[in-house]
Image (spheres, rainbow, N blue to C red):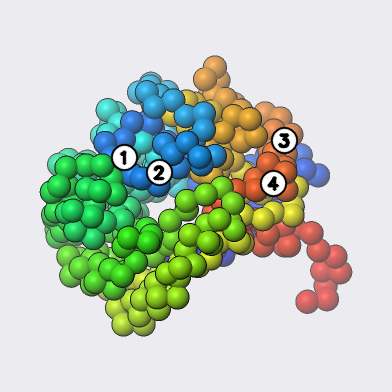
């Protein structure tokens, strides 16, 4: 089975890799863009870094922000002209609550750009679900609760929301000629870890194609996150391993990403290659280097496209990609940390012939 979560995909884009460093003048288009179309969300997860005051992610987010329809259409046209390969929608808010989401999806399909979305699954129905099923590459539903009561407590929603989402996913999985991979991200915490295997069995039974098991981030420091998980880590890890060993097959891919988090926090490098590979366009029309620095204006802002097109912004002034120093500005959780280190190792070598 092919690995959907491989960190080596970037090496299929040799020209892009070789253009990354400051010494190379030519700027090439990003490979993948994450767009946050709206900051409005219909759930209120207890650990949401965009809403919890003590987490740095989202510290400057304005909940009412959304990308105007004309600007979104312009962004998609720019991505098509630039040769961007893929677009992922995420929060901020819940992408499926974006008032122009159906128009946006149709525009992307017309421009033949691969697309995907993270979602809570609450609005996964109707025409937009049909379009995703037959045109999107993947869709990943984020879940933490394991039944109606636990889900309602974790997300501050009405009892019954969990059952509605499960039904939405079951119906989506059963759509005729569906080509979109339906995935689930199960966020492990102290309240749900005993249900890891039971929940994974449920997901497989309703037709989900893949599941990602990962730990809840509760603090800005790796050490504090590890302290939170250590009390139940061994038991949770044993269950996640059991899911991988017993449920993973050609119809159900299990990605066990549950681990302690030091390697996602500490940085010893001074520039971020991934800011040129997978940037973020926020609902505020600011450009951020990654999802972990989104809505952090003090040390996470690359620039703004409020007064210019994304295409003009991207190809003007390469120095903007080197303003952020990860060793100083990014001592927070970073999903791209391992990939950054791998790319920097690739770029910074001598004696190339001696392989």
How much space separates mark 4 and mark 1, taking CA atoms?
A: 30 Å
Q: Residue at x 35, y 80 (%)?
A: 242
Marks 3,4: beta carbons within 8 A:
no
Q: Which mark is residue 44?
A: 1
Q: Earlier in the sequence, mark 2 or mark 3?
A: 2
Callout 3 touching callout 1 (CB < 8 Å): no
- The spot of residue 116 in percent (x, y) is 36, 48
* Circle 3 residue: 323
Separation of marks 2 and 4 at Cα, in angstroms = 23 Å
Determine the image quadrant of residue 223.
bottom right
Frontmost residue, 280 versus 70:
280
**Residue, disc 4:** 326
Label 3 or label 1, whichever comes before in sequence order: 1
Mark 2, other Cα within 10 Å: few <14 / some 14–19 / many ≥20:
some
> For the point 36% across and 45% down, which residue is it?
46
The image shows residue 224 at horizontal and vertical percentages of 55, 55
Q: Earlier in the sequence, mark 4 or mark 1?
A: 1
What's the distance in space between the residues labelled 2 and 3, CA to CA?
27 Å
Query: As drawn, is 308 to the left or to the right of 135?
Result: right
Farthest residue in the right direction? 351
Q: CA distance from mark 3 to mark 4?
A: 10 Å
Q: Which of the image's four quarters has the N terminus?
A: bottom left
Q: In the rendered structure, are the residues bearing label 1 and label 2 in contact, judged by CB atoms less than 8 Å apart?
A: yes
> Which mark's residue is nearer the viewer, 2 or 4?
2
Mark 4 crowd level (few <14, some 14–19, many ≥20, 10 Å Cα): many
């Amino acid at each position: 089975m092919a690995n959907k979560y491989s960190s080596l995909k970037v090496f299929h884009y040799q020209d892009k890799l070789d253009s990354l460093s400051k010494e190379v003048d030519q700027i090439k288009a990003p490979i993948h863009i994450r767009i946050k179309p709206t900051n409005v969300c219909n759930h209120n997860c207890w650990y949401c870094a965009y809403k919890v005051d003590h987490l740095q992610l989202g510290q400057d987010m304005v909940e009412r922000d959304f990308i105007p329809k004309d600007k979104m259409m312009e962004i998609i046209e720019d991505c098509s002209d630039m040769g961007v390969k893929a677009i992922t929608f995420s929060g901020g808010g819940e992408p499926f609550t974006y008032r122009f989401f159906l128009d946006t999806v149709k525009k992307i399909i017309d421009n033949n750009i691969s697309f995907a979305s993270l979602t809570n699954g609450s609005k996964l129905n109707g025409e937009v679900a049909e379009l995703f099923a037959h045109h999107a590459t993947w869709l990943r539903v984020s879940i933490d609760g394991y039944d109606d009561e636990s889900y309602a407590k974790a997300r501050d929603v009405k009892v019954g929301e969990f059952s509605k989402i499960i039904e939405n996913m079951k119906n989506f999985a059963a759509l005729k000629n569906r080509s979109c991979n339906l995935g689930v991200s199960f966020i492990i915490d102290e309240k749900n870890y005993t249900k890891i295997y039971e929940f994974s069995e449920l997901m497989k039974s309703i037709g989900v194609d893949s599941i990602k098991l990962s730990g809840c981030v509760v603090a800005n420091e790796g050490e504090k996150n590890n302290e939170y998980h250590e009390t139940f880590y061994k038991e949770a890890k044993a269950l996640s391993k059991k899911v991988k060993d017993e449920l993973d097959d050609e119809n159900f891919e299990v990605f066990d990403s549950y681990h302690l988090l030091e390697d996602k926090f500490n940085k010893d490098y001074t520039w971020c290659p991934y800011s040129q590979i997978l940037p973020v366009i926020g609902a505020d029309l600011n450009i951020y280097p990654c999802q972990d620095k989104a809505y952090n204006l003090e040390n996470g802002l690359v620039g703004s496209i409020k007064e210019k097109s994304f295409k003009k912004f991207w190809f003007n002034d390469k120095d903007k990609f080197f303003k952020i120093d990860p060793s100083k500005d990014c001592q927070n959780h970073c999903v791209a940390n391992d990939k950054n280190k791998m790319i920097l190792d690739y770029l910074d070598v001598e004696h190339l012939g001696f392989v």
